[in-house]
Image (tube, coloured by chain):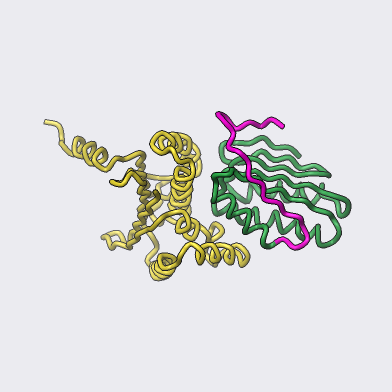
Chain colours: A yellow, B green
Amino acid sequence: MINDETLELHKFMQARRTLFCYSGPLSEDLLTSISNPVRQQLSESESDEGVAKRVFGVFVEQAQNIIRYATLRADTGEGVGTIAISVTEDDGFLIEAVNAIDSTKRTALESTLLELSMKDAKELRKMYKDRLRSGPPEGSKGAGLGFIEMARRVQRFEFEIADTENGPVFVYRGYVS
Amino acid sequence: MEQAATQRTPHIEISEAACRIVGECYPENIQEFSAPVMSSLRSLVPDSGAYRVEMELFYFNSSSAKFLFDFFEFFEEKAASGLAVKIKWNYRLDDDTMLEAGEDFAEDMESCEFELVGVEVPSEGESEAE
């Protein structure tokens, strides 16, 4: 008797209309390798190039967040996380990312995202520009613009910092349609 | 300087008269990508005369935005001290993201001439032809 988890996994992924899903150590090399197949999947299921580009843009920022900031690291040093793109009921896209975070960063992350979730497009555009001029905040390995960029490309996003036995885990869900 | 496009970096040409950047920009390592570009600009771009900059980006990530900011700031400083810089920011007519990005960079330009140019979406395959 085969363990039916495998079949359940298949059914679950299919029912969610999964276009792409990866869970494990993520590196820039891997992101390069998966970029083309992800884009191809997107262009096959979305005729509006602008929508496909926004989904891809959110996907790249999420992937780079995992690469740079996930606190669970593989033996090779790569950040470990889960990243997925699926089609929603209204034929839009859901881009999801999950990764472990440092408990000391929790409050700052929560307040950043809460602030972003309350801004409209115009305010986000201004925030992005201001951040670009002022340079990255302390502790950022990029330009400190990633979450603002994502907030600008999604219709809406949800986030949660869940407690697990191994520490806090960051969950992000962005919707593009 | 001439650098062919890769999957994640644009085609780049820098001479003493013009600079052209076309393609995608989400490099694996932004410092490794931007350092040689900025150093070519510093050694090749003259202090006086005229200079053309032509940009056509289809996508850039947030890390690359900082590079573009520094890139335009370099030209803004050159223009403020006497170089006549003309920048053309090409965006696809249906691409609001790249239009907005161009508008935001344009807003910071005082000494450079910055032109936003909407281009038709090319048919199959991005042609590099001129």
Query: Can residue A104 be spotted in the picture?
Result: no
Question: Residue at horizontal 65%, vertical 53%?
Answer: B68
For the residue pair A4 and B44, the one nearer the viewer reads as B44
Say how many tags the image has.
0
Q: In this view, does A105 lie to the left or right of A12?
A: right
Direction from residue A63 to residue B22 in the image, left or right: right
Front residue (pair A100, B81): B81
- Residue A25 visible in this rendered orientation of the protein: yes
Q: Which residue is rendered at x = 79% and y = 53% of the image?
A: B85
Q: In which quadrant will I find the N terminus of chain A?
A: top left
For image coordinates 48% across by 48% down, the residue present is A57
Say which of B72 and B101 sits in front. B101
**What segment carries the magenta color?**
B109-130
The answer to which quarter of the image holds residue B122 is top right
Magenta stretch: includes residue B110: yes
B99 part of magenta stretch:
no
Which secondary structure is most common in the magenta stretch? loop
> Which residue occupies the extreme left position in the image?
A1
Tell me where residue A66 appears, x and y as whole percent: 43, 52
Q: Which residue is drawn at 54% across and 44% down?
A: B94
* Quadrant of residue A129 within the rendered picture: bottom right
Q: Position of residue A27 (x, y in %)?
A: 47, 44
Horizontal and vertical percent for residue A92?
Answer: 36, 46
Residue B89 x %, y %: 67, 48
Give the side of residue B56 with respect to residue A45, left or right: right
